Amino acid sequence: MIRWWLAVWALGTVFTAPALALQNADPVAEPTPEDDLDCAILVSMLLAAQEDTLSPEQRIGLVSGMTYFVGRYEAQRGADVDTAMVERSNAFPKGDLAALSKNCSARMKAVGDRMIVAGNTVSEIENKDNPPAPTPQSPPE
């Protein structure tokens, strides 16, 4: 169970870290599948453009974010994301990348924050169910 908690906590941190580098914005309240696809395209563009300058942690964070957005898109549309990305690239809002970037990073941060909370909750449950073993006392002198 601890491994699961560590994975949840680490993934939450991975999602949150890249998003913190960008200015905070309120995420879209009810994003559409196309919003998810736009974020996946934006993140893939960032990965390609900054391939040589990203740290391993940044790369993991961005790939995790892209996976999140792709998963949301495919779950809602049931369509292959590859074809959708090619088709959507024609309507991609290239003129307002700053606003899109703020929105996508806010959404990544929000899901990362939720995963950290979930990881902390699991940790609290584990600690309650499995209290630490008492440490042996030294004999009195």
Image (spheres, grey):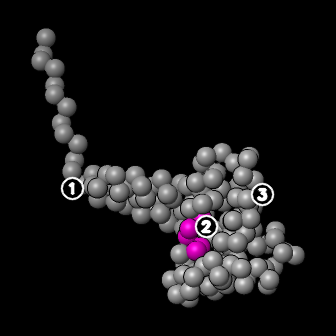
Regarding mark 1 in the picture, which secondary structure is present there? helix
Between tags 2 and 3, which lies in front?
3
Q: Looking at the image, is mark 2 or mark 3 earlier in the sequence?
A: 3
Q: Which residue is mark 2?
A: 66
Quadrant of the drawing holding the C terminus: top left
Q: Which mark is residue 129?
A: 1
Residue 134 placement, left or right of 108: left
Q: Looking at the image, is mark 3 or mark 1 earlier in the sequence?
A: 3
Inter-mark Cα distance, 2 to 3: 15 Å
Residue 67, x across and y down, in percent: 56, 68
Inter-mark Cα distance, 3 to 1: 47 Å
Q: Residue at 61%, 67% (x, y): give it.
A: 66
Residue 38 in view: yes
Between tags 2 and 1, which lies in front?
2
Name the amino acid, label 1. Asp
Q: Residue at 47%, 63% (x, y): give it.
A: 115
The magenta segment is: 65-70
Check if residue 123 falls in the magenta segment.
no
Check if residue 66 falls in the magenta segment.
yes
Q: Which residue is mark 3?
A: 49
Residue 36 in view: no
Local crowd at mark 2 within 10 Å, few (<14), some, or many (≥20)? many
Q: Residue at 76%, 73% (x, y): give it.
A: 100
Q: Looking at the image, is mark 2 or mark 1 earlier in the sequence?
A: 2
Local crowd at mark 3 within 10 Å, few (<14), some, or many (≥20)? few
Name the amino acid, label 3. Ala
Name the amino acid, label 2. Met
